[in-house]
Image: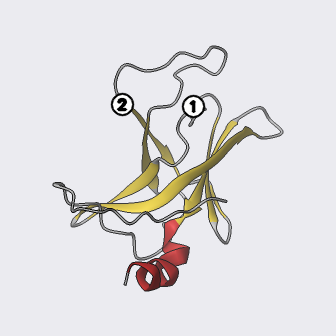
C-alpha cells in the first residue's frame, strides 16, 4: 500500500480535487484516469490520458478494489486517482496501489482508500 504527500515549493494554478469524506458504497462507479499501458499483452503507451469507470467491487480496511473481466488499470497507472461524483463535483477517493488478476482471470484494480487516512493527511499538511 502506497500513499505519499508532497510539499510543493510554490502554489499550483489549478484547484486540487477535494478529498472524499467517507468510503464509497459497493457498486459506486469510480472514474479511473491514467497514463498506463493500453494493452495487457503489449507495452503500448497512450498518446493521451485514458480513463475508465468501474463500479467498486470490494472494500477492505484500507484498499478499494474494482474487478472486471477485461478492463482495469495497467502498468504505468501507479499513483493515479480514483474519483467519485458528488453533488458538489468530483472528490478523490483512492490512489492506485496495484493491479492483479483474481482466480477467475478477471482484472483487479487496487486503490488505497484515501478516506481512511483523512486524519493523517490533515495532520501532515497542517
Read off the residue under disc 2: 49
Residue 56 screen position, x and y as percent? 55, 54
Residue drawn where x is 38% and y is 57% of the image: 84
Residue drawn where x is 46% and y is 77% of the image: 121
Image quarter of the N terminus? bottom right
Residue drawn where x is 80% and y is 35% of the image: 104
Residue 76 screen position, x and y as percent? 55, 33
Q: Residue furthest right?
A: 103
Q: Decide which of 22, 69 is in the foreground and name it.
A: 22
Task: Place residue 85 in its image quadrant.
Answer: bottom left
Question: Considering the numbered disc 2 on the image, is that residue within a helix, a strand or a loop?
Answer: loop
Q: Dot 1: few (<14), some (14–19), or many (≥20) neighbours within 10 Å?
A: some
Residue 101 screen position, x and y as percent? 75, 37
Read off the residue under disc 1: 71
Q: CA distance from mark 2 to mark 1?
A: 16 Å
Q: Decide which of 121, 110 is in the foreground and name it.
A: 121
Q: Decide which of 55, 16 is in the foreground and name it.
A: 16
Disc 2 or disc 1, which is closer to the eye?
A: 2
Residue drawn where x is 20% and y is 60% of the image: 15
Q: Name the N-terminal-most of marks 2 and 1.
A: 2
Task: Place residue 87 in its image quadrant.
Answer: bottom left
- Is 105 situated left or right of 77 in this image? right
Amino acid at each position: 500500500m502506497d500513499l505519499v504527500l508532497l510539499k510543493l515549493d510554490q502554489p499550483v494554478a489549478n484547484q486540487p480535487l477535494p478529498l472524499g469524506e467517507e468510503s464509497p458504497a459497493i457498486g459506486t462507479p469510480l472514474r479511473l484516469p491514467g497514463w498506463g499501458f493500453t494493452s495487457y499483452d503489449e507495452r503500448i503507451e497512450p498518446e493521451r490520458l485514458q480513463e475508465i469507470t468501474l463500479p467498486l467491487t470490494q472494500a477492505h480496511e484500507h484498499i478499494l478494489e474494482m474487478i472486471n473481466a477485461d478492463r482495469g488499470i495497467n502498468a504505468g497507472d501507479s499513483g493515479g486517482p480514483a474519483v467519485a461524483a458528488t453533488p458538489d463535483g468530483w472528490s478523490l477517493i483512492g490512489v492506485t496501489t496495484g493491479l492483479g488478476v483474481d482466480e477467475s482471470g478477471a482484472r483487479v484494480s487496487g486503490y488505497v482508500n484515501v478516506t481512511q487516512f483523512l486524519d493523517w493527511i490533515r495532520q501532515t499538511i497542517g
